[in-house]
Amino acid sequence: MIPDKKYIFEHNEYCEMCGDKTENHKILGQRLNQSQGFRPKKKTGITVSVKKCRNCGLLYSYPMPIPFSIQDHYGIDPEEYSWKEDYYVDDPDYYSTQINTVKKLLPEKSTGMKALDVGAGLGKALKAMQRAGFDVFGIEPSPNFRTRAIEWLKIPEDQIRLATAEEAVFPDNHFDFITYGAVYEHLYHPAAVLERSVKWLKPGGIIHIEVPNAENLVGKLINRYYRLRGTNYVTSLSPMHAPFHLYEYTVKSFEEVCKKLNLELVEKKFDVCSIFHFPGIMKPFMRKYMEWTNTGMQLTVYLRKPLN
Ligand SMILES: [Zn+2]
């Protein structure tokens, strides 16, 4: 018998992003701890509920399953990602959209700008930001990924700390740019982590966050399909299996957290990304529709700390 992971289950009383009471929030359905496929009634496992905030539209796991050890979720071998064929390619254009956008948003300055990558992974964004002239630092909670970043992309050891965003310590007003790429949906208490990192940011500095879009069309269609089949399953989130998405976000979620933390939402962007689970013939139409209606898979926001 393989022992299962151990969790504590947290019942959030308030929406993490806007503070609305969770007791009246809409229950979207149940999410299994594995892929549910087209016939989820045939699957066994543990489920948690997925709820939607009535005020800001945030999708969240309720209760929130928090593993005893973070390594239960993220202690995986980076080689497991090698199926992603572009994963180990050191592409000179990697992160160029993000870097160009942030350079446009930051006050004019030629040298000495400091950037922090939260959840640095293999260090690809660190390398890209270094090439773009930033002094770079990263934090990464997985020892395996951190070691690979040091070996593969020659990131100096003292520039990539083994730490979670919840426990890392940096001086106040230190960074010009903080980036959360494919990280923010994995945090148990994202608003609290954001609040910590705002302190590390210089006035006028920018925080960049990329997250799954709660309004994405694919999720809505699959959830409708599950209802038509007479189940109460939903495809939204993956709180207890890879890729461990705990939240999906809306623009309003960020507008609300910006009010709370005194930030300005200065730029937002929706990307369709890859469409899975649908026949190839439908994809071009879906892609166009998703572009028109801002219902792509990914939402990107840039938040600025005011100068005073
Ligand atoms: Zn909310």
Image (cartoon, rainbow, N blue to C red):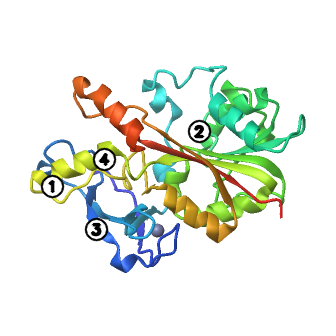
Label number found at residue 12: none
Q: Are marks 4 and 1 in contact (CB under 8 Å)?
A: no
Residue 71 percent across, percent down from the top left = 52, 51
> Label 2 crowding class (10 Å Cα cut-off): few <14, some 14-19, many 20+?
some
- Residue labelled with disc 3: 27
Mark 4–mark 1 Cα distance, whole angstroms, equals 12 Å
- Residue pictured at 36% horizontal, 31% vertical: 288
Mark 3–mark 2 Cα distance, whole angstroms, equals 37 Å
Q: Nearer the viewer, residue 151 or 296?
A: 296
- Residue pictured at 62% horizontal, 26% vertical: 94
- Residue labelled with disc 2: 144
Label number found at residue 227: 1
Q: Are marks 3 and 2 in contact (CB under 8 Å)?
A: no
Badge 4 amino acid: Gly
First reached walking from the N terminus: tag 4 or tag 2: 2
- Residue labelled with disc 4: 219
- From the viewer's perspective, is 185 left or right of 233? right
- Residue 239, placed above or below residue 273: below
**Viewer-nearest of discs 3 and 2:** 3
Mark 3–mark 1 Cα distance, whole angstroms, equals 13 Å
- Residue pictured at 86% horizontal, 40% vertical: 108
Location of the C terminus by quadrant is bottom right
First reached walking from the N terminus: tag 3 or tag 2: 3
Badge 3 amino acid: Ile
Image quarter of residue 158: top right
**Viewer-nearest of discs 4 and 2:** 4
Mark 4–mark 3 Cα distance, whole angstroms, equals 15 Å
First reached walking from the N terminus: tag 3 or tag 1: 3
Q: Secondary structure at mark 3?
A: strand
